[in-house]
Image: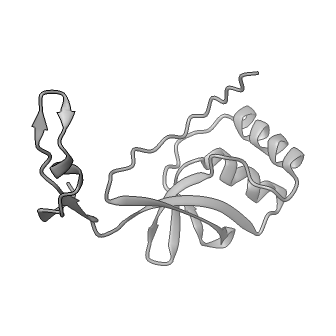
Amino acid sequence: MTVMVAEDRSMCIQPHQVVRTAWVDIDVCKLGCRTLMSPEAVEKKFRRLLNLGDAAPWPPVVGHWEGERFFVDDGRHDYLAALMIGREKLFVCWLECVAPPTFLMTELHLSGAEVTAASLNAEPARPIAAL
């Protein structure tokens, strides 16, 4: 059985970033984009929240932090539906930068298509920073 889910939310994650999720107070959230919205689309999200009860849909509302405020970048229909239903918390996600990890690079000596025993037992040659 194949399950397919189509959502409009997507993020591009770089190797030096992590995705953080949390339940935040809905009072600290603010719309990042205030263009017109379809009432039918907000109603659809409202009905979805009614069916979920206290749970949150996946993927969560995507945004970013500016000081103490969370700005909703994607998922504004879900945000408005949560306001309409009277929720106090909103499940959100955002990207955070982390220090790039250091990888150890070894030199593998190849003879044709085979890896030599010396390369399998080799000590790391030198550390390099990840891109």
Q: Is residue 65 left or right of residue 6?
A: left
In the displayed structure, would residue 112 be above or below residue 96? above
Image quadrant of residue 116?
Answer: top left
Name the outermost residue toward the bottom.
68
Residue drawn at the location 44% of the way across and 77% of the way down: 67
At which x and y percent is residue 4?
A: 67, 26
At which x and y percent is residue 28?
A: 60, 72
In the displayed structure, would residue 52 be above or below residue 104? above
Q: Quadrant of the C terminus?
A: bottom left
Residue closer to the observer: 21 or 25: 21
Q: Quadrant of the N terminus?
A: top right
Residue closer to the observer: 10 or 47: 10
Name the outermost residue toward the front.
117
Residue drawn at the location 78% of the way across and 39% of the way down: 43
At which x and y percent is residue 62?
A: 54, 53
Residue drawn at the location 12% of the way across and 37% of the way down: 110
Image quadrant of residue 66?
Answer: bottom left
Q: Is residue 64 left or right of residue 43?
A: left
Residue closer to the observer: 63 or 97: 97
Count of numbered marks: 0
Residue closer to the observer: 42 or 25: 25
At which x and y percent is residue 80?
A: 69, 52
Name the outermost residue toward the top.
1
Q: Is residue 98 left or right of residue 108?
A: right
Residue drawn at the location 11% of the way across and 62% of the way down: 125
